[in-house]
Amino acid sequence: MGSKNKLRRFRENETFSNVYQPTRDELINEDFDIKGNWNDKVFKNENPLVLELGCGRGEYTLGLAKRFPNKNFIGIDIKGARFWRGAKTATEDKMANVAFLRTQIELIEYAFASNEVDEIWITFPDPQIKYKRTKHRMTNAAFLERYKAILKPEGLIHLKTDSEFMHGYTLGLLHGLGHDVLYANHDVYRQEGSPKEVTEIQTYYEGQYLEKNKAITYIRFKIK
């Protein structure tokens, strides 16, 4: 993507009422007054709040929002030029249950209050296979603690990935830490009974993985 294109998307994001772009300082200094008030100030209802972390173009956020109109969805990514497409589509289609937040996942507990979130989706994250990158792996123990800080006690986390490594790493960690694995499937498109929200919503890159016969894995779990 050219720099002119990126700048145009950044400028357009600033005009969307469904896009929120607090600075790092605003979050850390607790100057982001939407924290703890997402349903009241943004969605104007008390419906369950669902996050997609690393949402990219926002395809999964939009797909979930269409499937579950009685839930509120927030796509989160640091790259605003990516989620511009999702924000624009949600604006054009007047999807009142969709918003986008530009921030780092590491700052998520500064953007949401304790017990504010009902579900978290992590879709096709970078598995960060190299040892030096493990601190950035989005299902490591430190990230799980961040999620726990904002989830309701019975809150759910979903991991959908094309990485067998990420799937196996996460399962092993969850079992080792004593968390509740509610469902796990290492090939959702080739096994009967897979959840429809997992198989009937696909991202652009997921379609490419499937064309190459790559297995798509899924885990649903709770943090104790």
Image (cartoon, rainbow, N blue to C red):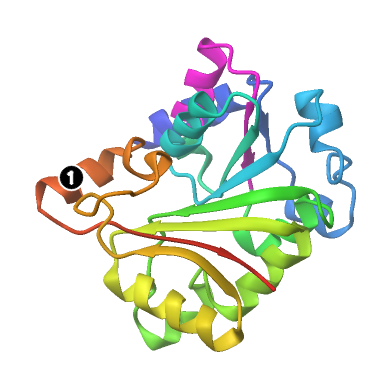
**The quadrant where residue 48 appears:** top right
Q: Dividing the image into 4 quarters, which one contains the C terminus?
A: bottom right
Q: From the viewer's perspective, tell me whether residue 94 is left or right of residue 146.
A: left
What type is the residue that disc 1 sits on? Gln
> Few, some or many C-alpha atoms within 10 Å of disc 1 (few <14, some 14-19, many ≥20)?
few
Residue at the far left in the pictured view = 212
Q: Dividing the image into 4 quarters, which one contains the N terminus?
A: top left
Residue located 89% across and 57% down the image: 29
Q: Nearer the viewer, residue 197 or 162?
A: 197
Q: Position of residue 221 (x, y in %)?
A: 55, 64
Q: In this view, does 105 lie above or below 117?
A: below
Residue 150 seen in the current view: yes
Residue located 90% across and 48% down the image: 31
Q: Which of 91 and 79 is in front in this view?
A: 91
Residue located 59% across and 23% down the image: 69
Q: Is residue 57 above or below residue 206?
A: above
Q: In this view, does 183 lie above or below 61?
A: below
Q: From the viewer's perspective, tell me whether residue 148 is left or right of residue 31.
A: left
Q: Does the magenta stretch include residue 85?
A: yes
Q: Name the residue under label 1.
A: 208
Q: Where is residue 14 in the image (x, y as percent from the top left)?
A: 64, 26
Q: Nearer the viewer, residue 181 or 108?
A: 181
Q: Which of 105 and 198 is in front in this view?
A: 198
Label 1 secondary element: helix
Query: Which residues fall within the magenta stretch?
Result: 84-102
